[in-house]
Structures are given as structure tokens and as C-alpha cells.
Amino acid sequence: MIIIPIKEGEHIDRALKKFKRKFEKTGVIKELRRRKQFDRPSVVNREQRMKAIYVQKLRQKEL
């Protein structure tokens, strides 16, 4: 459950903005979209390997 402290006299727009920001940080929407379709384990592993290679190349360029 998300709890947002609201000060006395604070605008509802500001409270809503705080709620949205906190809700995004929890990652609920991202998780729902990820679970919407099934990805085969081989595809997931391939994507992880490609991402690791990409990050490794970026780090090598920095040095």
C-alpha cells in the first residue's frame, strides 16, 4: 500500500504528482506489461546476453 503524507493546505495536484511518482517507483505497471505476454526462456536469456555485451562495450570505451 502506498502512503503519501499530505501537508495541511497542500494542493491536490501536488499530492497527485507525489502519488504518481511513488507509484512509478514501485514498478507495478512495468511488471504488468512484462507479464502480459509470455517470452520463452531462450529469448529472455538472449536479450540478457545482448544487454550484457552492450554494457561491457560501453564500459570498455570509457577506459
Image: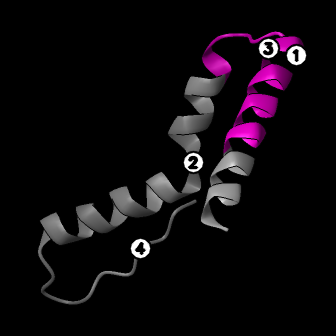
Closer mark to the observer between disc 2 and disc 4: 2
The image shows residue 60 at horizontal and vertical percentages of 71, 57
Closer mark to the observer between disc 3 and disc 2: 3
Q: Main secondary structure of the magenta part?
A: helix
Between 54 and 61, the residue placed more toward the observer is: 61
Marks 3/2 in contact by CB < 8 Å: the verdict is: no
Label 4 amino acid?
Ile
Looking at the image, residue 14 lies above or below residue 30: below
The image shows residue 47 at horizontal and vertical percentages of 74, 25
| Mark 3 vs mark 2, CA separation in Å | 22 Å
Badge 1 marks a residue whose secondary structure is helix
Q: Which mark is residue 4?
A: 4
Badge 3 marks a residue whose secondary structure is helix
User: Which of the 4 image quarters holds residue 46?
Assistant: top right
Q: Which mark is residue 43?
A: 3
Please report the residue visible at 20 percent of the width from the left and 90 percent of the height from the top. Answer: 8
Closer mark to the observer between disc 2 and disc 1: 1
